């Protein structure tokens, strides 16, 4: 854990300033007087210079008339202690099993379609096990559903507003394995909700660090009296008792009910759904609680309440393709694997027995291997399925799995907005899910004078075909309620400098009631063919954690099948080659 954490605010001013430093646990915290601006940069490096902080509590005063002093006002929170949780240890053990597995006499050459987190994870762990992955990405950018692009000004815009939770054990292990833990900017352990009936105000659930789970979560709920009344809290707690007592078996059995139906069945007041679970449903799966499976909510609540740091959030310090995906690619290539962009799969070609013969790319290139993986979203997989496979039950069940549309909006304003936090915010508006002022929360987007809001527009079903200008107009109407003193729909207050709208017609699979039995295992019934993706069978559903875990399970299945695949190679010679 870094002793110095992340510096997060700097201002140069001609006024006399005082800076206080003190050590709190394993990280440094500080406050300063005077006007401040926000800046964020990782580790203990500040503008290329090492930040050195004394080991004792001090107060430093630098009253110099003609020199602008450096003023530090806050730092990101330290990485929470995750390593001793059961889920983290299980994830670490699974990771270690690839590194410690017997080295293959002749490595398998595995062709993987899709360089999102699922495909990257599959390739990474196959390489760890001594095999050679050949990872093919259709586009010119890594990341899949975490892809991002640079505009002409050099500013990044992303597919989504990505948050890394403490309850993501496989993702957290992945960061550690790559040596990039310092790229996560951890925030205070809180959940912050806008108050629709009190424009410009927020309600907080603060999780005290001194209490273990689940007491810290219970405390956070009990201390918040702005969103739920005490009778509502009691009825909700009673409604949750079966889930607490029934464990995982109960949670899985609730897949047939929507959040709204489950709440009513348990006698939970509708106002609890309105106040809390509309926002939570939209944040988890971009849909409302009358559509979302209750299993999804219960899994999230279980992780958040049973793990002390489960709901603690972190932002990546830059764009996912550069700061997360490229280190995975570097790792894969260092072990002999390959990653190829602009390699779109046009057709899965079959042998006479129905197994995969090769992948045909759109440019006419034929790619052959010892095993094949489709790590694309489920909707793309269904487009690629050979006709001969469509009536196989394993594939036929996929019909119910459909990606949910989502829109990610970025707006650069001409001024620094004040009514925000260095955190993810739940908007609780009709059209928006969550948002953040990225000029404060993330190093890459730092700007001391102007804000850049990144917002998730959801549900997006009725908006995905609308024009960007229509979406921006609707977003500004919602922002006028969140920032009543700073933003107006007609831009008579804060003015838009530029914006980007990123539409994903089919994002993560829509977690509706009854879809759990349709999720496939990573090993298909066809020898040598495998699937990876958050829609495949794993316990974290539609999430970055689910994508990474699915890749590990896919790689594990291939490693377990090594003898079978090696024997098959001898019967039908095949190499990962370009024909």
Image: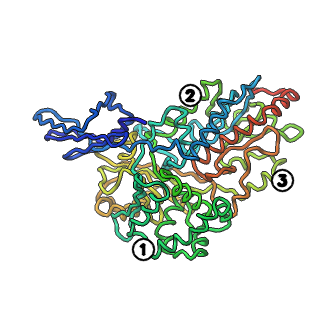
Q: In whole angstroms, how far apart are the C-alphas of marks 3 and 1?
A: 52 Å
* Residue at 57%, 68% in the rendered image: 241
In contact (CB < 8 Å): disc 3 and disc 1 = no
**Mark toward the viewer: 2 or 3:** 2
Residue corresponding to mark 1 = 229
Label of residue 330 in the image: 2
Residue 74 position by quadrant: top left
Q: In whole angstroms, how far apart are the C-alphas of marks 1 and 2?
A: 52 Å
In contact (CB < 8 Å): disc 1 and disc 2 = no
Q: Quadrant of the N terminus?
A: top left
* Residue at 46%, 42% in the rendered image: 316
Left/right of residue 283 with respect to residue 295 in the rendered view: left
Q: In whole angstroms, how far apart are the C-alphas of marks 2 and 3?
A: 40 Å
The residue carrying pointer 1 sits among few (fewer than 14), some (14 to 19) or many (20 or more) residues within 10 Å by Cα, namely few
Q: Residue furthest left?
A: 65
| Mark found first going from the N terminus, 2 or 3 | 2
């Amino acid at each position: 854990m870094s002793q110095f954490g992340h510096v997060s605010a700097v201002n140069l001013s001609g006024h006399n300033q005082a800076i206080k430093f003190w050590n709190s646990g394993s990280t440094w915290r500080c406050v300063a007087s005077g006007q401040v601006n926000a800046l964020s940069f990782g580790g203990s490096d500040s503008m290329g210079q090492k930040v050195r902080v004394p080991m004792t509590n001090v107060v430093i005063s630098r009253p110099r008339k003609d020199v602008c002093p450096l003023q530090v006002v806050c730092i990101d929170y330290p990485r929470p202690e995750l390593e001793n949780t059961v889920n983290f240890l299980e994830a670490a053990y699974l990771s270690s099993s690839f590194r410690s597995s017997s080295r293959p006499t002749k490595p398998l050459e595995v062709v993987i379609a899709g360089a999102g987190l699922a495909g990257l994870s599959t390739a990474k762990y196959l390489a760890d096990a001594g095999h050679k992955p050949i990872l093919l990405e259709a586009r010119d950018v890594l990341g899949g559903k975490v892809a991002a692009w640079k505009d002409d000004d050099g500013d990044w815009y992303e597919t989504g507003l990505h948050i890394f939770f403490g309850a993501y054990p496989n993702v957290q292990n992945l960061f550690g394995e790559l040596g990039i833990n310092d790229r996560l900017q951890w925030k205070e352990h809180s959940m912050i909700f806008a108050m629709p009936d009190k424009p410009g105000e927020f309600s907080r659930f603060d999780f005290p660090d001194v209490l273990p789970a689940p007491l810290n979560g219970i405390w956070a709920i009990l201390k918040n009296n702005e969103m739920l009344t005490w009778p509502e809290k009691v009825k909700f707690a009673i409604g949750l008792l079966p889930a607490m007592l029934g464990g995982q078996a109960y949670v899985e059995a609730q897949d047939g009910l929507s959040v709204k139906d489950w709440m009513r069945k348990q006698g939970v007041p509708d106002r609890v759904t309105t106040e809390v679970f509309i926002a939570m449903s939209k944040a988890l799966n971009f849909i409302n609680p009358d559509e979302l499976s209750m299993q999804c909510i219960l899994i999230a609540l279980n992780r958040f309440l049973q793990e002390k740091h489960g709901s603690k959030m972190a932002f990546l310090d830059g764009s996912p393709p550069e700061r997360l995906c490229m280190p995975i690619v570097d790792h894969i290539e260092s072990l002999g694997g390959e990653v190829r962009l602009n390699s779109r799969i046009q057709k899965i070609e079959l042998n006479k027995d129905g197994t995969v013969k090769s992948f045909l790319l759109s440019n006419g290139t034929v790619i052959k291997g010892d095993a094949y993986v489709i790590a694309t979203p489920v909707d793309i997989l269904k487009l690629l399925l050979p006709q001969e496979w469509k009536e196989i039950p394993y594939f036929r069940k996929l019909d119910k799995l459909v990606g949910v549309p989502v829109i990610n909006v970025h707006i650069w304003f001409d001024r620094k907005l004040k009514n925000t936090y260095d955190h993810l915010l739940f908007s609780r508006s009709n059209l928006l899910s969550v948002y953040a002022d990225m000029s404060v929360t993330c190093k890459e987007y730092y700007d001391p004078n102007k804000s850049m809001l990144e917002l998730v527009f959801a549900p997006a079903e009725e908006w995905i075909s609308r024009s960007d200008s229509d979406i921006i107009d609707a977003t500004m109407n919602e922002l006028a309620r969140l920032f009543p003193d700073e933003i107006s729909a007609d831009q008579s207050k804060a003015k838009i400098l530029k914006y980007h709208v990123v539409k994903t017609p089919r994002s993560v699979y829509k977690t509706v009631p009854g879809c759990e039995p349709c999720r496939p295992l990573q090993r298909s019934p066809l020898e040598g063919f495998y699937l990876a993706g958050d829609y495949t069978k794993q316990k974290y559903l539609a999430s970055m954690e689910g994508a990474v875990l699915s890749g590990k399970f896919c790689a594990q299945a291939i490693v377990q099948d090594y003898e079978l695949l090696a024997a098959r190679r001898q019967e039908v010679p095949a190499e990962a080659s370009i024909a």
